[in-house]
Image (cartoon, rainbow, N blue to C red):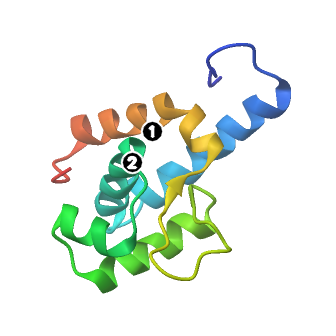
Amino acid sequence: MILVFGNSTPGELYDSRRLKMILWGIIAGTRGGPNRARILNLLYSKSLNELQISKELKLDHKTIHHHLKILTKNSLISKPSDETYDIKYDLTPIMKKNHEVFDEIISKMKRGASYGY
């Protein structure tokens, strides 16, 4: 069972389990996973736009755009829909609330293989 800090409801536990499955699939289960993990880790500290993320991680803008689409589609990050320029990405509330799930997966990835994360 995945524990959510504080008083958790059955819905929150379901969301945590679902989040864990999603994270394992798109971070640990794919070749681009380590870069997605780096993006999520970066967004824990601040909201950034695509160009800022690209510069911080020293990755091509197209690569960042691809990973942001996947992370957004899986409800791990969000962007304000009313902005059209300089859109800043941020973690979704469930991702912010379950930081320990992300840390657990990264820790297991580091123990299991050298991913360059």
Q: Position of residue 51 (x, y in %)?
A: 30, 75
Q: Position of residue 13 (x, y in %)?
A: 74, 29
Q: Amino acid at mark 2?
A: Lys
Seen as rendered, the residue at the extreme bottom is: 62
**Residue 74, how many percent across, how many down?**
61, 63
- Image height check: is 96 above or below 38? above
Residue drawn where x is 76% and y is 31% of the image: 12
Q: x, y (%) of residue 80?
A: 62, 66
Mark 1 closeness class: few <14, some 14–19, many ≥20 residues within 10 Å: some
Front residue of 58/16: it is 58
Q: CA distance from mark 2 to mark 1?
A: 17 Å
For mark 1, give the secondary structure. helix
Query: Does the residue at mark 2 contact the one at mark 1 (Cβ under 8 Å)?
Result: no
The type of residue carrying mark 1 is Phe
Foreground residue among 7 and 106? 7
**Relative to 15, is 39 above or below?**
below
**Front position in the image: 72 or 102:** 72
Q: Nearer the viewer, mark 2 or mark 1?
A: 2
Q: Quadrant of the N terminus?
A: top right
Circle 2 is placed at which residue position? 46
Disc 2, SS: loop
Residue at the disc numbered 1: 102
